[in-house]
Amino acid sequence: MKKIELIIAYLLIITLVVTPAFAEDLTPPPGDGFSRAEIFRLQHMYLIEENQEIMDFINTFGISDYEIAYINRTHRYKYIIPKGNCSKKLVFLEISKGSDEKWKREIVWVRQIGMNETIPFEPSGPLDDFFTAHPEAENNDTIVSFINSYDPRKWKETPTDMNQTSSLVYLVADRDVFRELMFMEQKGNISWVKTFNELQVSVDKEQALHIAAKEMNSSVSPVDIHVVFRDSHPFWVVTYITGPAVTTFYIDTDEGEIYYYLKDAETDEPGQSSYKVPGFSGMFTLIAFGVSLWIARERGKS
């Protein structure tokens, strides 16, 4: 019997080493002789051994049980229920990030709470899924530096071709100064990266909003503002929704000239309106923008 338990222990350890990202989901079958405390230690041996607070709690009070509360696919709470005489249990927030061989688990924070307490799910941050969706961005110094320096609170991705093999991705840091980073991703590779700072152009965000508001001639507020580049030149993109219509203004960051694109809201089902905001919503919008610029230039020549 001891030989069988030893073989099972070896197999479990090997499995945990091969698939560390999903180790918490692996539970030995009933009757194998492992206690909940032993299972927890086996599943987390490489994660918790370097965290002194967790190890001190376990060594002092032991483990009678543990619980896992999943927040999303990358974030989860782990509760350790003590075995000894203790009025508190320990909880830590664990995240998984990266992909394939770069996948790794990390403990964000550790704290002790009452035995009957639970930690409410914290709302996910705006960039919680960014590196999961774009792991290649972790190796780009410009993107990492932008995130660390300006803490963008918004990001968006939109396919640029019918086969969805490439997409435009942009991050917006809109605080005292509006900053944006945009990159093109093609089949998992980043082909170019551009950054924008409103202090470097003549028409800043507030001026662009003022120009667009005068054109709308109504009290409606914009639902989105960001920047697009055309031939390396930035344009403000300000979008409004009024009733069934979506209006997007493209505003030159040098002269404040306006080009706009009007699109009726699409309807997916009878009686239900689905609003698709232009800007980065597809190549059709970009083509329409290009045509409007060409018309404006031709009029300027005449």
Image: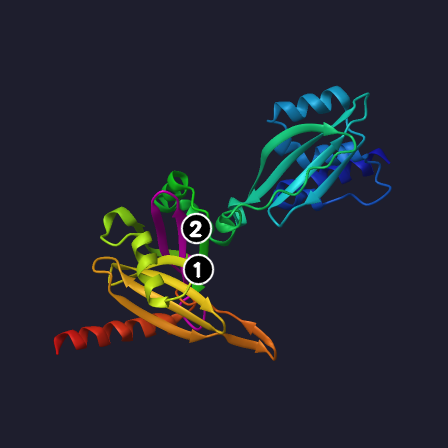
Q: Quadrant of residue 118?
A: top right
Could you say which disc has been placed on residue 118 in the image? none
Closest to the camera, between mark 2 and mark 1, is 1
Let me know if residue 280 appears in the view: no
Image coordinates for residue 108, horizontal then vertical, percent: 57, 34
Residue 87 lies, in percent from the top left, at 79, 24
User: In percent of the image, x 43 and y 42: which residue is there?
Assistant: 151
Vertical comparison of 273 with 98: above or below? below
Q: Residue 81: within the magenta? A: no
The quarter of the displayed image where residue 32 is located: top right
Q: Residue at x 34, y 66 (%)?
A: 249
Residue 82, placed above or below residue 301: above
Of residue 16 and residue 278, the one placed in the foreground of this image is: 278
Mark 1: few/some/many CA within 10 Å (<14, 14-19, 20+) = few
* The magenta stretch spans residue 164: yes
Q: Secondary structure at mark 1?
A: loop
Occupied quadrant, residue 75: top right
Q: Is residue 205 left or right of residue 127?
A: left
Q: Which mark is residue 221?
A: 1
Q: CA distance from mark 2 to mark 1?
A: 36 Å
Q: What residue appears at the point 61 percent right and 80 percent down from the top-left corner?
A: 270
In this view, the residue in front, 32 or 283, is 283
Amino acid marked by disc 1: Ser
Vertical placement of residue 104 versus 184, above or below: above
Residue 280 in the figure: left or right of residue 101: left
Chief secondary structure of the magenta portion = strand
Q: Amino acid at mark 2?
A: Glu
**Magenta stretch in the rendered image:** 159-188
Image x and y of residue 258, in percent:
27, 66
Which type of secondary structure does the marked residue at label 2 adopt? helix
Report the residue marked by disc 2.
136
Residue 115 x %, y %: 78, 30
